[in-house]
Image: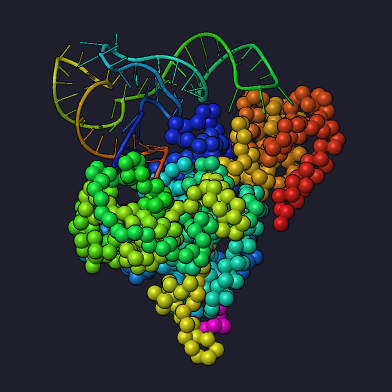
Amino acid sequence: MKLWSQFFIPTLKESPADAEIASHKLLIRAGLVRKLGGGLYTYLPLGLRVMQKLTQICREEMDAAGGIELWMPHVHPVELWQQGPRWPAAREIMFRADSAGDGRRPPREPEFVLGPTHEEVVTPLVKAEITSYRDLPRNFYQIATKFRNEIRPRFGLMRAREFVMMDAYSFDADDDGAVRSYRAMKAAYERFFRRVGVQAIAVEADTGVMGGSFSHEFMVPAEVGDDDVIYNEASGYAANREKATSALVPADLADAPPAGEREEFATPGVVTIAALEAAPYSVPATRQFKTLVYIGDGRPFLVILRGSDELEEAKLGALGFSVYRPATTEEIEPVMGAKPGSLGAVRGTIRNPDALAGIFADHAIRLIGNGTTGANKDGFHVRNVNVVRDLGVTRFGDFRRVQPGEPDVKSGQPLQVRRGIEVGHIFKLGTKYAERFGAMYTDDQKQSHPMVMGCYGIGISRTMQAVIEQSHDADGIVWPWNCAPYQVLVCVLDPQLPEAMALAKKLGGAAEQAGAEVLIDDRAERPGVKFKDADLIGIPLRLTVGGKGLREGIVELKWRSAKEVSKVPLAEAEARVGAAVREAAAAGKKD
RNA sequence: CGGGGUGUAGCUUAGCCUGGUAGAGCGCCUGGUUUGGGACCAGGAGGUCGCGAGUUCGAAUCUCGCCGCCCCGACCA
């Protein structure tokens, strides 16, 4: 039982100016966190308690799924990362430090990075300690602080530079085992989010810089989320926009036949799809080829899309470059012979085709039998271009961005889109890290194999905010039972009356006996202040004890999530409180 | 990193355009009256106006530079 008057819950009547979204405002107003700098937060006692609830639930579910908890350093020798497969992509977001501490590290002094995740630490550990198939599979996890020098921290804990994450790493002898580990984690995640009391849906996801073969994200649907989820209710399809596909392009697409002789024509000043669509050219965007130039690991390559489609940049990850970016005009001209707006991939028109690392085309362009594209000559385009005859495509792939309304691959029904907050991500990694770090084991035939890995993360601090985003009203937070900082709040309206305090402590004791944690608001504040604060901090069950109630012989019992107040006769109060707590706890643990 | 915005007391902010002794609300302290949904009265403390240059007799206000923070984009748990 904690007395509010001797605790630290600095609530705010007004929202701080730098908070934009509801959950961020409430984090601050309810006294859960305070900002130190961009993306850096102090967890105040109430916020810390919620974090402890989340970590404990997470730990229980990981342990139940066979996870083994450990704790790894968060300062890593930079050499470890330089050996790893994702250094080129990861280095930008990593905090770096030198042992001299003054930013002027002598060449022979060690340099360190702060860990954004721990594949580079856990894989060498397992390489050293596990060498036999008898010791596989294993799944190691930790719940700890992570550091990422986010380009743009935002929305409080939603994208922070320093945050708390559960990260797990599974090691299996073979692919089947890795799939089993992956499924076990997916199930554990689903139990975790259900117990926490937040709706999080698993969606197919892109593997990003992690690489690996498949992946799911756990998304909390919310307007303020960073990600677009493309889904269809009926078929159950749900994918991150970066990964999503539609049935717009038939799988067994026949290449369209050539039509007519290729012909160059003058298009002075036309540098956009829209301008070529307009009179006098009148070429529909669906019949134009859009040619984009990217730089992958230092070499230019082309991406060809239909004029009506947008590139989904993340899908270029499938091409295997460790880093890629759009080329600049200065880089484009020497290779192509023209500026953006007049580019094309017709054989023989590219000035320096040998410089290209490849020409990659979206499947959808095969629908174009007779298209128009840039001539690689400023102010000119080419018509009657045929994909097979005229374009030297290295490889077709899925590179286009799916738009809402396009047909679902599974059901043909229109796809929908909604925003979501990514609170968890699971990857089947494969052998990429194991091979790089030499994490091998010997099988029962004395053969050596790389271990097959998976990695898994839950953003604990982000989940706290996602819960608030999903569970609040105009007055404040409405905590789900299992992650509430306290489950029961006793508001003592007349704390100067000894009998009121005595009753509050008696009822608090009954709640504790039933398994709840209890906060007593014994402050010398007016009732209005206490009720407002109670609504703001969102404790699930509120008991109100006051002189008036004592005279009437009642206490009040109110759920934060409901409007009604029940008046309970004093004689029944203890029993009713205990019953309410047991009931809520049982409902909160429905799994 | 590109674009937009903002910085005045612990918090929310007015004042800036049109230069002339820095104002309010909340919170805090003292006293009193109140006491079931953010009370009232009286008194009080608290500000190098983000930092640095410049213009000017005079700068919160105009100019330039820097920094912090917020929002949009690429990235992520």
Colouring convention used in this rendered image of the protein:
rainbow
Along the viewing direction, whichever of A499 and A120 lies nearer the viewer: A120
- Residue at 81% of width from left, 37% of height from top? A573
Q: Magenta stretch: residue A46 in it? A: no
Decide if residue A588 is in sight here. yes
The residue lying furthest to the right in this view is A571
Along the viewing direction, whichever of A412 and A82 lies nearer the viewer: A412
Q: Quadrant of residue A395?
A: bottom left
The residue lying furthest to the front in this view is A260
Left or right of A96 on screen, residue A228: right
Q: Position of residue A356 (x, y in %)?
A: 27, 65
The residue lying furthest to the bottom in this view is A445
**Location of the C terminus of chain A (image quadrant):** bottom right
Q: Position of residue B44 (x, y in %)?
A: 43, 15
Q: Which residues are magenta?
A: A131-138
Decide if residue A502 is in sight here. no
Q: Quadrant of residue A289?
A: bottom left
- Residue at 50% of width from left, 37% of height from top? A21
- Residue at 39% of width from left, 47% of height from top? A284
Left or right of A451 on screen, residue A232: right
How many badges with numbers are in the image?
0
Q: Position of residue A389 (x, y in %)?
A: 34, 65
Q: Position of residue B43 (x, y in %)?
A: 47, 11
Q: Is residue A89 above or below residue B6?
A: below
Left or right of A467 on screen, residue A273: left
Along the viewing direction, whichever of A232 and A189 lies nearer the viewer: A232
Q: Magenta stretch: residue A135 in it? A: yes
Along the viewing direction, whichever of A176 and A395 lies nearer the viewer: A395
Left or right of A492 on screen, residue A101: left
